[in-house]
Structures are given as C-alpha cells and as structure tokens.
Image (cartoon, rainbow, N blue to C red):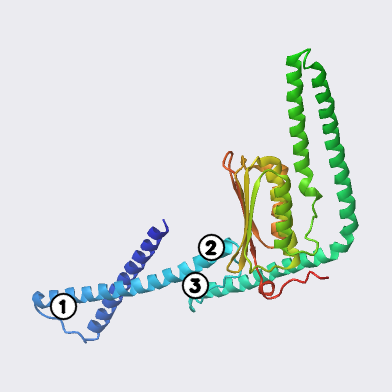
Amino acid sequence: MHSEKTKNMVTRGMGQGILFSVLLGAVIIYILSSYGYLTPWSTWDRWIPFGATLVLLLVGVGACYGFFQAYRTKVKLERLRETLLQWEKGSVMRAVPELGSDEIGRLGEQLSRISKKWEEQVSSLQRLSTNNAQLAEKARISAIVEERQRLARELHDAVSQQLFAISMTATAVGRTLDKDFNRAKRQVALIEEMSAVAQSEMRALLLHLRPVYLEGKHLEQGLRELVRELQAKVPMEILFEMDENIHLVKGVENHLFRIIQEAMSNTLRHAKAEKMEIRILRKDKAVKVVIRDDGEGFELDDKKQASYGLSNMQERVNEIGGSILWITAPGKGTRIEITVPVMDEESEVTPDYGR
C-alpha cells in the first residue's frame, strides 16, 4: 500500500511537471510571436517537425523536473516517516534529520523542537521518579517491615490451617480405609485438593514477601536474586538475561523491578506456565524489557486488566516515560514488551546506590 502511494505521488509529480512545462512553452511562444521574434513558416512540412520536437522537448523537460521534485519530496517524507515510527516505538532520542528549507523542512524543524521538549519531559519524569524514590525510602522502611510481618502471619495462618485440615483428613483416612474404601478414596481426593489450595496460597504470597524495592542493589543483581530464589521454590523454569551496558537511574530501576515482579506474580498465580523468560536489552537509546511465558494466556479486556494488575504496570511505565505492549491469547501464552527511553545523563552516570 505504501509503495503504491509512493508511485502515485511520483506519477502526479511528473504529470504536473509536464503540464507546467507545456503551458510555459505555449506562453513563451505566444509572447515571442506577439513581438515578432518568431517568423511563421508558410508550409506545414516545416511547422509539424518543429512543433513535434518542441512538444517532446517540453514533455521531457517537464517529466524530468516533475520526477526530480516528486522524488525529493518522497525521500524527505520517508525520512520523516521513519523518525515518527521510531518515536512511536518509544525511541524519543531519535533526532529529526535535515530536510531542507522548504515546507517539509520547516515542518521537520518544528518536529525537532517538539522532540527536544519531549526529551526534556521524559528526563524530568525520570528525575522526578528518582527523587520520589529517594524521599520515600526512609519513610517506607518501617512500613515495609510491618507489611512483611503481616503477610508472613497471613501466610503462616493460611498454610497452617490447610496443613491442619490435611492432617485431620489423613487421620480419618487411616481409620476408614478398612471399613469404607470408597469414603477413604474421597478423603484422599480431598487431601489432594487442599494441598493444591495451600500451594496456590504459597505462590500467591511468595513474591509479596520479597522486598518491594531494590534496597540498594542494581537492577540486574536484584532480579537475579529474585529468580534464583523462585527457582528453588517454584517448579517452573525461569530464564533471565540482561545486557551488561545498561545503566539506569535509581527511580527507573525501581519501577522496572516492580513491573517485572508484578509480571512474575501474575504468571505464578494465573498462567500455569512451565517456562518463563525475562530479557532486558539495550536498543539504541532505549531499554527494552521482554517477559514471556508459555502459560494459558487470556483475553485482554477491561476485567482482565483490573484483576491481573495490568493497570498498575501501565501506570508505572507511564511514570518513567515508557511504553508497554501485551501480546496474549487463550492457550498462546503471554508476552509483555516494555520500552523505556534512556536519557544521555543515564548512559553517562552510574547511579549512586551507596546513599
């Protein structure tokens, strides 16, 4: 479709050039004839070759001029379109190329000014998130401890109740096994069901007993520790990769850690997956996070976005000036792609975690 539009634009440009050239030639001939600079021939055998040659010359010149102008315009629009596509993907650091001094060039200059303001806004958002993280760190330490203790009590109480029920049912199985075999089978099935419920509760609260922020660690270190701990407790294969040349400010790392933590929690609770992959890559002037599992997937509607905590993930991505995309369907697993622009100051300064 795009190629067809490009051809149509070049064709229109050539047609306009031919029309302009023919009209201009006719005007020049008329003016020269009016002032007596052209002497008409008395016979048609001299007019016809002259006229045909002149028309062909004008058509050729007009076609070449129209093609040249249309091609230049096409190239400029292609470069501008490529830049806008990169902006749409989250690469706000992509500069608008030089497009000349015509209308398209002035449009490019205006977009360049918009791009600079956009960069400043994203940079301000990320600096603000870092400042907020630093200001909130001391105030939340006691709250984190209390929350962990509360969750630990809930986990202990819930699992203890399930274990007590399993223990009582197992005792009943021993008493009824010889007397009523069918009843004993039902009790065994009940034990299996209660065990599954206890396991689900453990998995649901497992990540929430983890630190809610990195607590002085780099993003890679915090995620590797989280993955290592989960692999020891959860029967699911978890692959984690992160490029070495990624340095982000503290606020951005905290948000990415929470987003990935939320995604892992959703997978443990809902996906019934056997494998999960987490990859953090550097793409030009942006960081791309890809989270994928081979679980059940789901229909992406308003209800799912609320129940799966997807709106919280979207809000966190917005706070650091990034974009997020969910790719999922029932029975097809889930893929999450997050793109966060990296400001110049982030790529040059390693965040200070010692304070």
Relative to 310, is 139 on the left or the right?
A: right
Identify the mark at residue 104; answer none if there is no mark. 3
* The quarter of the displayed image where residue 163 is located: top right
Viewer-proximal residue among 350 and 107 = 350
Query: Which of the two discs, 3 and 2, labels the residue nearer the N terminus?
Result: 2
Q: Is disc 1 placed on a helix, strand or loop? A: helix
Relative to 160, is 257 on the left or the right?
A: left
- Residue linked to disc 2: 85
The 10 Å Cα crowd at callout 2, few under 14, some 14 to 19, many 20 or more, is few
Viewer-proximal residue among 29 and 317 = 317
Q: CA distance from mark 1 to mark 2?
A: 52 Å
Viewer-proximal residue among 198 and 38 = 198
Quarter of the image containing the N terminus?
bottom left
Quarter of the image containing the C terminus?
bottom right
**Residue at 30% of width from left, 76% of height from top?**
24
Query: Which of the two discs, 1 and 3, labels the residue nearer the N terminus?
Result: 1
- Residue linked to disc 1: 50
In the figure, 350 relative to 261: above or below?
Answer: below
Asked if disc 1 and disc 3 are in contact, CB closer than 8 Å, the reply is no
Q: CA distance from mark 1 to mark 3?
A: 40 Å
Asked if disc 3 and disc 2 are in contact, CB closer than 8 Å, the reply is no
In front: mark 1 or mark 2? Answer: 2
Please say whether residue 37 is visible from this viewpoint. Answer: yes
Residue type of the residue flagged with mark 2: Leu
Residue type of the residue flagged with mark 3: Ile
Query: Which of the two discs, 1 and 2, labels the residue nearer the N terminus?
Result: 1
Residue type of the residue flagged with mark 1: Phe
Q: Is disc 2 placed on a helix, strand or loop? A: helix
In the figure, 234 relative to 5: above or below?
Answer: above
Please say whether residue 338 is visible from this viewpoint. Answer: no
